[in-house]
Image: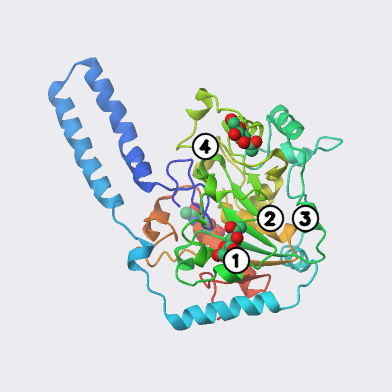
Amino acid sequence: MVHPSSKQDEKTQLVDKRHPKESKKWCLKSATKVPLKAVLSCYLAGKLKLGCTLLVFGVWILYILKLNYTTEECDMKKMHYVDPDRVKRAQKYAQQVLQKECRPKFAKKSMARLFEHRYSPDLPPFVKEAPKVNEAEYKYDPPFGFRQFSSQVQTLLEILPEHDLPEHLRAKSCRRCVVIGSGGILHGLVLGHALNQFDVVIRLNSAPVEGYSEHVGNKTTIRMTYPEGAPLSDLEYYSNDLFVAVLFKSVDFNWLQAMVKNETLPFWVRLFFWKQVAEKIPLQPKHFRILNPVIIKETAFDILQYSEPQSRFWGRDKNVPTIGVIAVVLATRLCDEVSLAGFGYDLSQPRTPLHYFDNLCMAAMNFQTMHNVTTETRFLLKLVKEGVVKDLSGGIHCEF
Ligand SMILES: *[C@@H]1O[C@H](CO)[C@@H](O)[C@H](O)[C@H]1NC(C)=O
Ligand SMILES: *[C@@H]1O[C@H](CO)[C@@H](O)[C@H](O)[C@H]1NC(C)=O
Ligand SMILES: *[C@@H]1O[C@H](CO)[C@@H](O)[C@H](O)[C@H]1NC(C)=O
């Protein structure tokens, strides 16, 4: 994922995140936005005809170049080949992970050991009503906190009846989570059956199940996304999923409210999104949650040790973790044992597919402006090597 301008991110995991998605759209936008303005004002002013013509011509050339660049395709279905032996090894490894004894609180304890004083095991995963204002939640601007948004948060909490995992999951004495990233590496490993056996399956942004269930499974316990990432197709929502919203900006609160209340999105709200957003989420209010922003803050500033926001243009700081990494940290709080699948960017292979579901190439990651992929990869590698999490598709560190 590449995130375009300051706002997109990548997708899920490193995949994730705010996606870059639609890089075509994105690149086009970024390539033309400023010159377009210049061209328009130039024409409107009606002066300097020759200058204008040259400018238009220049923009056109840039546009063609950019277009050519971004239409290069890395279509998983066309170009992917996975060695059958590797498929067998991956499947066997996943079954071993599932059959091993589940160790209560293992993930939390390991994180607390590895990141002493930088990981607080008791942070609630989702925002909930508290008798007194939780200052940590309001210390930073979104996505690291809800500073200046306390009334919007209150309004949302009034319509959200539940703030925890559903009862049937809480009742389990030991839970296994798998966080499914969008990485192209997932395609072809035929891990769907194994992934379905986890107690909690976390999917990110728009990463689809429809058409890919052989490789990514068809069970979703949690769909974690910011508004622009929410799947547009109703088929991607199962009536018992949790929809976990990650809120980045002011209109995200308005959007979530409309979704929970099953109301039409006000027109002015729609204008503020950088891509089309879902108009309806076919879930009951009790299935919505708001991610505790302190988890993003902790992931960014404490665990990854990014610098705190220096300016209003937080996108430039490269201090926003991808939604994939945030989900991994969340999973250590929701589950006793945590696995990953579909994680890992191999930037040395620019022409390999970035995602299991679209045509973006790995090279697109080099254009995103929100995330520090190097730091994230190092963090995930540490978790895998220390045995805190298992990497089922081997994109971070292959153990099969
Ligand atoms: C997943 O697929 C299996 C068979 O492929 C089907 O029996 C099951 O109902 C599906 N589950 C969901 C949640 O769609
Ligand atoms: C949302 O409203 C539509 C009618 O506008 C209704 O058909 C649908 O069932 C509602 N969805 C939920 C989850 O209540
Ligand atoms: C990513 O973080 C590392 C430190 O962990 C830093 O050295 C590097 O410059 C950062 N990269 C970018 C592109 O900000």
Q: Nearer the viewer, mark 4 or mark 3?
A: 3
Cβ(mark 3) to ligand 3 < 8 Å? no
- Residue identifier under label 2: 330
The colour scheme is rainbow
Alpha-carbon distance for marks 3 and 1? 21 Å
Which residue is at a point 74% across and 37% down the rendered structure image? 160
Which of the image's four quarters has the C terminus? bottom right
Hey, which quadrant is residue 26 in on the image? top left
Q: From where the camera sits, is residue 255 visible?
A: no
Q: Are marks 4 and 3 in contact (CB under 8 Å)?
A: no
Of all residues, the one furthest to the right in this rendering is 131
Q: Are marks 1 and 4 in contact (CB under 8 Å)?
A: no
> Badge 4, how many Cα within 10 Å: few under 14, some, many 20+?
few
Badge number at residue 79? none
How many marks overall?
Answer: 4
User: Does residue 4 sit above or below 177 in this rendering?
Assistant: above
> Badge 1, how many Cα within 10 Å: few under 14, some, many 20+?
many
Which residue is at a point 51% across and 54% down the rendered structure image? 207
Amino acid residing under circle 1: Leu
Amino acid residing under circle 2: Leu
User: Does residue 367 sit above or below 104 in this rendering?
Assistant: above
> Upstream in the sequence, badge 2 or badge 4?
4
> Upstream in the sequence, badge 3 or badge 1?
3
- Residue identifier under label 4: 313
